[in-house]
Image (spheres, coloured by chain):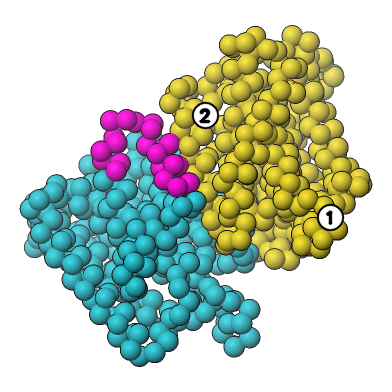
Chain colours: A cyan, B yellow
Amino acid sequence: MASTAEAAAPAARRETERSVGVAAAVMVVFLIAAPFLLYPVFLEKALCFALFACAFNLLIGYVGLVSFGHALFFGWASYLAAYAAKSWGMPPELAILNGTATAAILGIVAGSLAIRRQGIYFAMITLALAQMMYLVALRVKLTGGEDGIQAVPRGHLFGVFDLSNEMTMYAAVLVIVLAALFLIYRIINSPFGEVLKAIRENEQRAISLGYKTDRYKLLAFVLSATLAGLAGSLKAIVFQLASLTDVHWTMSGEVILMTLVGGLGTIFGPVVGAFVIIAMENYLAPFGQWVLVIQGVIFVLCVSLFRRGIVGELANRLRVRL
Amino acid sequence: MFEIFGIPSQALFGQLLLGLINGSFYALLSLGLAVIFGMLNIINFTHGAQYMMGAFVAYMLLQYLGINYWAALLIVPVLVGALGIVIERVLLQQLRSLDPLYGLLLTFGLALIIEGLFRNYYGSSGQPYAVPDSLQGGRNLGFMFLPNYRAWVIAFSLVVCFATWFAIERTRLGSYLRAATENPTLVRAFGINVPRMVTLTYGFGVALAALAGVMAAPIYNVSPQMGSDLIIVVFAVVVIGGMGSIMGAILTGFALGIVEGLTKVFFPEASNTVIFAIMIVVLLVRPAGLFGRSL
């Protein structure tokens, strides 16, 4: 977990804000330059997963809750976004909104069930709920079963921007993801975020200070689910596809891996982790099943030797918070 | 043959039997999870993969070395359990002082590795494993046909479950174990080697999973994903029962298997989600689980 000395002195706070600002600037410059150097579709995918991982990190890194079922929100949001765009002919912004709202509702239901138990049970409950909804996705007509929803139209964003142009699509994804990441940053640093960290460090004490911790946990869970849903909806529009892969438990595992590789409880870690893992999967695609083994090995190595993750390690070396 | 609620008795009891079989596996696996959780304070995510390994090692022993089912029933738990001991010594032990979440992530990674390796070599289709000769066939009970092998699985898993319960709740070794679960430091001060006990407990839990795997091999096809599908259901079983009590884990496992079997008769389309639905109801009504100490 991240260091506990949060916002001790104003000077330290300013220091942190400066380092975060510099890192954010580097990230934005890289992301603006990137489509001229790398495949835009690869970058769009990585950005969607970066948002997904950041949404997940909001829970694991700042509230200390490990959800093993985030594929539920990511996958179902992508189904509903794809369905809205294809079958109802909604424009992309409304389709994305539709998917995101679905995730929010699922987040309220799953969250209010899962926070009834703590620690290890929380992980098992979220996993079981996600598996249940995976089995539902396998059955119901809306999702298209094994085929998924294919050939989803990208459409025109706000009726103006033609998303079938790859650069326009990239710009749209970039703006939405950066806005969401900024929102997450603001949540973490708000008074609400401070209470979340207090719950992570010592829930009993937070309760004794008069905080209704269950409400805080639920709100954090719903925010996390909603943002994961936004990521899933975006992905459905970008790839014009919503499929069972996105609701399967391996997807929940993947987002945990991204966050772990980048650094649990760091601001930029999940973004870096998502890019690393997506790039790795791209290069390893020809090796098929080995991807699973390699993911597992990375899990084991990260937990055994490299618990801070890439960004956490970097921040530790530079003695800043990132 | 006769009918009950308009359902032929053969179908009803057949599904009940299948439910009891599933229930035996839920009971064996959730028992292992509970034992491991008690000592190591982690949820062993690798449990499903270790169950799958049990089935696969039995299959490989038969295929490559011609070692039969009965010998496999003894050898496989020892082999897979020994591998579990290595895992505990090399990987899990260093996480003792950390947040239990790391144990969860590590065992999840191990599950991916094991499943991935088996998928590489055996693909995702299942391999058949023949029912041992001595348990071929079955008997007609009048209201249903009872295959011998299935009767054996239910009887044997009941014996294993209750033997485990007896060993933990009624023997001296078990009392050490329970004491070490409550207060490891104090038990160590009495001169008992707690770290070794932790290692052996993990090995034992893993061996139970492998034993379940061997028993499952002739019933289900031996396939690399048989573990991950099952373990998620077992997690729901554990959430329903709570991990505080050994007997609770056994009873919940069998009961849920039966409920699942009955659902298959009356609402077939809900049969694979019914356990999750029960989990939701239990969380709403009795959040600590049926047998759980409040957590």
Residue B89 position in % (x across, y down): 62, 44
Q: Which residue is mark 2?
A: B224
Question: What residue sits 68% from the left and 34% below the top?
Answer: B81
Q: Residues within 10 Å of mark 1 (few under 14, many from 20)?
A: few
User: Which quadrant holds residue B134?
Assistant: top right
User: Which quadrant holds residue B41?
Assistant: bottom right
Q: Which residue is mark 1?
A: B191
Residue A242's place in the image compared with A197, above or below, is above
Callouts 1 and 2 close, C-beta under 8 Å: no
- Look at the image and tell me whether residue B240 can be seen: no
Bounds of the magenta segment: A280-301
Query: Do badges 1 and 2 share one subunit?
Result: yes
Residue B153's place in the image compared with B48, above or below, is above
Question: What residue sits 34% from the left and 58% below the top?
Answer: A310
For marks 1 and 2, give the one nearer the viewer: 1
Question: What residue sits 82% from the left and 61% below the top?
Answer: B189
Which sits earlier in the primary sequence, circle 1 or circle 2? 1
Q: Residues within 10 Å of mark 2 (few under 14, many from 20)?
A: many
